[in-house]
Image (cartoon, rainbow, N blue to C red):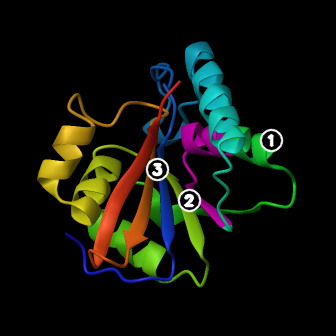
Amino acid sequence: MAALLPPPHRIYLLRHAEAAWAEPGQRDFDRPLNPNGFGQAEIVADRAADKGYRPDILLSSTALRCRDTAEAVHRAMGEALDMRFVDTLYNASVDTYLEIIDAQDAGAVMLVGHNPTMEQTLSALIGHDAMVASVPSGFPPAGLAVVEYDLSASGWRLIDFVID
């Protein structure tokens, strides 16, 4: 498990929703969400907002499919949500994701990013066995892991996993 210590006390890991296949000549970076993905993003964002899950800051990869997903969260949670796009989240390692989280001076941080790094980050935070038990089929598109720091256990634990 990662040695990342609060702040933040809560981390939201949101994998981008289902993306369209690349058109001929289109870069992977420029793939938008497909119609199903737009619906997934809206549903997960609304469910998260209904549960009171609200980050202090949302950091999203600059890839189009992540920006589309982040925009759905922004709409569901309101204009006051501090949303930033971070180039280094695209094709980043788990260490980069953890460093970006650790660099934030916020109580609750949301990352909108890519698999397999999202799944690896969840595993690094809560442990591989806990991750596999919680998400046995892997981290799905538009999956939102809600992770909190548990003072009594001195570690991170998954408190919810929101899907469409």
Q: Does residue 139 appear left or right of residue 137 in this picture?
A: right
Q: Which residues make up the magenta segment?
A: 57-70
Are the two marked residues, 2 and 3, in contact with CB atoms closer than 8 angstroms? no
Residue assigned mark 3: 113
Where does the image place residue 13, in percent across and percent down from the top left? Answer: 46, 52
Asked if one can make out residue 137 in the rendered structure from this viewpoint, the answer is yes
> Is tag 2's residue or tag 1's residue first in the polypeptide sequence?
1
- Label number found at residue 75: 1
> Is tag 1's residue or tag 3's residue first in the polypeptide sequence?
1
Tell which residue pokes out farthest to the right in this image. Answer: 79
Q: Does residue 147 lie above or below 98 as drawn? A: above
Q: Does residue 2 lie above or below 141 as drawn? A: below
Q: In whole angstroms, how far apart are the C-alphas of marks 2 and 3?
A: 10 Å
- Label number found at residue 94: none
Are the two marked residues, 2 and 1, in contact with CB atoms closer than 8 angstroms? no
Q: Does residue 99 lie above or below 19 as drawn? A: below
Q: Residues within 10 Å of mark 1 (few under 14, many from 20)?
A: some
Query: Is residue 64 in the magenta section?
Result: yes
Q: Does residue 77 lie above or below 107 as drawn? A: above
Residue assigned mark 2: 110
Q: Amino acid at mark 1?
A: Arg
Which residue does the image show at 58% across and 24% down from the upper left?
Answer: 40
